[in-house]
C-alpha cells in the first residue's frame, strides 16, 4: 500500500456520502439515487462509478476480484485490481468463490454468487427510459408513477423487425415489481442470475452520478410479452477449453484465414472446470 | 342531461396578456364543439389548459367519467390524469410529428396506447393495430413502415388511429387539417366525421377554418383576444353573426 493516500483512495467524508446513497439505494430496490461523483484518476467510461462504489464499501479484510467481459486478465480488470492493491493493500483473487467483493463490467460470473458476497457493476447509462424520453424531469415522473408501458414499444419493434426480441445486452428489468432498471451492459444471458440472488448487487454510474442496488433475494424480472416470453441465448457449441455446454461463449478469430475458436467468456469458470477435469488450464 | 365536460370561468394569462378570459361552456356526450378565432386569440391555450398541459390561473374543470363519477380535473392525482388521458381522452396535434413517434413503425405507434394501459400480448396488439389502420384507410402493408415515410395526410390519419385505438370518449383536436392540401383535407374531414358518428365521440375542435367547423361542429364558439365573443349553434352563428368580429370573419371567407 502506498503512502500519501487515504485507505481506498477516497477521503472518509466522500466514502460516507457514497455509503449514505448506497443505503438509500438498498432500501428502494432499483431506484436511482443521485450521488456526488468524484473525479477519479481514470477517464469516464472506464468504470469510475464502479470504482467509487467499491472504494466506499471495501474493508481491510475484503478479498477483491475484478472482471471485464468475464475475464480477469483484460486491461480494465488488471488496472482496477492493481489500483486497489496500491491504495488498499487488500488481498485480490481471480476465483469467484474466494472473493468477498467483485467489481464487474459486462458479465456476472458463471459460478453462482453466495450470501455475503457483494458484486459492483460499472454502469454507463443508468436510465432505462432514456431512449423513449429525453427529458430527465419526465423520466423521473414516469418512475414515480410506474408509467412503463412505452418501454414495450422497443420490444414490439424488435419482434416486428427480427421476429424475436433482439435486445442482447442491457436488457431492461423490473426490480421487486416496482422500478424499471438497466442491468448495465451485461448480456441478456446473465439476467436470470440477478433474480433472487443471495449476493448484494450494487450499481454505480460515475458520469451520470447515479447509484442503484438490488438487495439479496429480490425479484428481478426481464420485460417480455405474453406470447414472446423472455429467453436467453443458446449456443450449439461447447467451450473448446473446458467443454462447458451452458456458459456464455466468446467467438475468437484466431488466424488470418478466419479460423474461429469458441471459449467461455468467464476465464475463472473455465480455469476451474479444466482443473477439476485434470485438463491443463489454458488462457485465452 | 348530464354534460361530459363542464368548464367554468377558466382564466390563463401570460404576464399582462389574458390568453383565456373567464371562459365557460358545457360539452355534452356526442357533441362536437368548434372553437374558432384568429391566431393569438387563445384557442390553443384553452385546449391545452383543458388537457392539463398548462397550469391554469383559475377556473373549474369538471369531467364525468365512464363510471359516472364527477372528477375535478384541476385537483385529481397526476397518475389518475395520465390514465384518463390514455383511455377516455385523446389529443390530436396539428403537426403529426408532435403526436407520433416518427422513428418507430406505424404498428408500434398505434400499439403504444394499448401497451400503456397494460396490454402485453404482441399478437393481439398487432391485430388491433391492423384493424385501426384499415379504419383510417391506410393500406395494411404499411403497418411496418415508418411514419417519416408517410405523406402528410397519412401521418395525420395515423395519429387519429393512435388516439382512437383505446376508444376514448372525448377527443381534443388542435387544427387537425392544418398544413394539408385541400383534397387531402376534404378526405380527412370526411373520415373524422364518420368516425365521430360511428364511435359516438365528443370532440372539441380548434381551428381557424370556417369550412371545417361548418362541416363538423354542432356548436361553435368564436374567440377574440382571449374572450368568447359569440357562441351558439354552428349554422346560426355562421349564417346570422351578431358580433362585429364574427361578421368580419364570415365575410372574409372566400366562397368558390
Image (spheres, coloured by chain):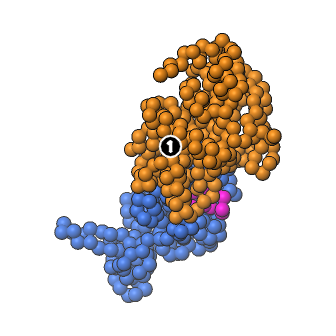
Residue B56 x, y percent position in the rendering: 72, 29
- State the quadrant of the N terminus of chain B: top right
Foreground residue, A262 or B138?
Answer: B138
First to last magenta residue range? A172-183
Query: Is residue A81 in view from this perspective?
Result: no
Foreground residue, A131 or A265?
Answer: A131
Which residue in the protein does label 1 denote? Answer: B157
Label 1 lies in what chain? B
Which residue is pictured at 60% across the width and 60% down the height? B119
Q: How many labels does the image show?
A: 1
Identify the chain drawn in orange: B
Residue B21 x, y percent position in the rendering: 72, 21
Which residue is pictured at 68% across the width and 53% down the height? A24
Residue B246 x, y percent position in the rendering: 64, 17
Residue at the limit of the structure toward the top, as seen here: B244
Foreground residue, A18 or A122?
Answer: A122
Compared across the picture, whether A133 is left or right of A161 comes to: right
Which residue is pictured at 67% across the width and 18% down the height? B240
Name which quarter of the figure residue B209 lies in.
top right
Label 1 crowd (10 A; few <14 / some 14-19 / many >=20): many
In magenta stretch: residue A5: no
In magenta stretch: residue A182: yes
Vertical comparison of A155 with A205: above or below: below
Compared across the picture, whether B86 is left or right of B131 comes to: right
Of the chain colours in the picture, the one used for chain A is blue
Q: Report helix, strand or loop for mark 1.
A: helix
Amino acid at each position: 500500500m502506498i503512502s500519501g493516500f487515504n485507505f481506498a483512495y477516497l477521503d472518509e467524508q466522500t466514502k460516507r456520502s457514497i455509503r449514505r446513497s448506497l443505503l438509500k439505494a438498498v432500501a428502494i430496490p432499483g431506484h436511482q439515487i443521485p450521488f456526488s461523483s468524484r473525479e477519479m484518476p481514470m477517464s469516464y467510461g472506464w468504470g469510475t462509478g464502479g470504482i467509487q462504489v467499491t472504494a466506499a464499501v471495501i474493508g481491510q479484510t475484503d478479498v477483491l476480484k475484478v472482471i471485464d467481459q468475464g475475464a480477469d486478465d483484460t486491461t480494465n480488470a488488471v488496472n482496477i485490481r492493481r489500483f486497489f492493491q496500491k491504495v488498499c493493500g487488500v488481498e485480490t483473487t481471480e476465483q469467484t468463490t474466494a472473493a468477498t467483493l467483485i467489481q464487474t463490467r459486462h458479465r456476472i460470473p458463471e459460478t453462482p454468487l453466495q450470501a455475503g458476497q457483494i458484486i459492483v457493476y460499472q454502469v454507463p447509462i443508468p436510465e432505462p427510459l432514456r431512449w423513449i424520453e429525453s427529458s430527465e424531469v419526465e423520466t423521473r415522473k414516469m418512475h414515480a408513477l410506474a408509467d412503463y408501458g412505452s418501454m414495450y414499444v422497443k420490444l414490439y419493434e424488435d419482434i416486428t423487425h427480427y421476429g424475436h426480441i433482439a435486445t442482447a445486452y442491457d436488457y431492461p428489468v423490473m426490480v421487486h415489481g416496482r422500478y424499471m432498471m438497466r442491468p448495465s451492459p451485461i448480456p441478456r444471458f446473465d439476467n436470470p442470475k440477478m433474480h433472487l440472488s443471495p449476493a448484494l448487487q450494487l450499481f454505480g454510474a460515475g458520469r451520470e452520478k447515479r447509484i442503484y442496488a438490488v438487495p439479496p433475494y429480490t425479484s428481478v424480472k426481464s420485460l417480455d410479452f405474453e406470447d414472446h416470453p423472455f429467453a436467453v441465448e443458446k449456443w450449439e457449441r461447447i467451450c473448446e477449453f473446458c467443454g462447458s455446454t451452458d456458459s456464455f461463449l466468446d467467438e475468437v478469430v484466431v488466424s488470418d484465414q478466419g479460423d474461429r475458436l469458441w471459449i467461455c467468456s468467464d476465464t475463472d469458470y473455465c480455469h476451474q472446470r479444466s482443473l477439476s477435469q485434470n485438463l491443463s488450464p489454458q488462457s485465452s | 342531461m348530464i354534460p361530459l365536460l363542464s368548464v367554468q370561468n377558466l382564466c390563463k394569462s401570460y404576464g399582462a396578456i389574458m390568453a383565456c378570459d373567464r371562459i365557460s361552456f358545457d360539452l355534452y356526450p356526442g357533441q362536437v364543439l368548434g372553437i374558432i378565432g384568429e391566431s393569438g386569440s387563445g384557442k390553443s391555450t384553452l385546449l391545452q389548459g383543458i388537457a392539463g398541459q398548462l397550469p391554469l390561473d383559475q377556473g373549474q374543470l369538471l369531467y364525468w367519467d365512464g363510471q359516472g363519477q364527477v372528477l375535478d380535473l384541476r385537483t385529481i392525482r397526476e397518475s389518475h390524469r395520465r390514465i384518463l388521458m390514455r383511455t377516455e381522452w385523446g389529443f390530436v396535434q396539428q403537426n403529426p410529428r408532435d403526436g407520433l413517434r416518427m422513428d418507430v413503425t406505424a404498428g408500434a405507434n398505434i400499439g403504444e396506447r394499448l401497451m400503456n394501459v397494460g396490454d402485453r400480448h404482441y399478437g393481439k396488439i398487432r391485430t388491433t393495430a391492423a384493424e385501426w389502420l384499415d379504419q383510417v384507410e391506410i393500406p395494411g402493408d404499411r403497418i411496418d413502415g415508418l411514419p417519416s415515410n408517410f405523406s402528410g395526410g397519412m401521418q395525420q390519419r395515423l395519429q387519429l388511429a393512435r388516439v382512437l385505438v383505446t376508444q376514448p370518449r372525448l377527443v381534443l383536436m388542435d387544427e387537425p387539417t392544418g398544413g394539408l392540401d385541400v383534397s387531402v383535407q376534404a378526405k380527412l374531414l370526411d373520415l373524422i366525421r364518420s368516425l365521430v358518428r360511428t364511435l359516438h365521440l365528443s370532440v372539441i375542435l380548434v381551428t381557424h377554418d370556417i369550412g371545417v367547423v361548418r362541416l363538423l361542429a354542432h356548436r361553435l364558439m368564436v374567440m377574440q383576444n382571449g374572450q368568447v365573443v359569440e357562441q351558439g349553434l354552428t349554422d346560426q352563428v355562421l349564417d346570422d353573426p351578431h358580433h362585429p368580429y364574427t361578421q368580419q370573419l364570415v365575410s372574409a371567407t372566400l366562397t368558390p
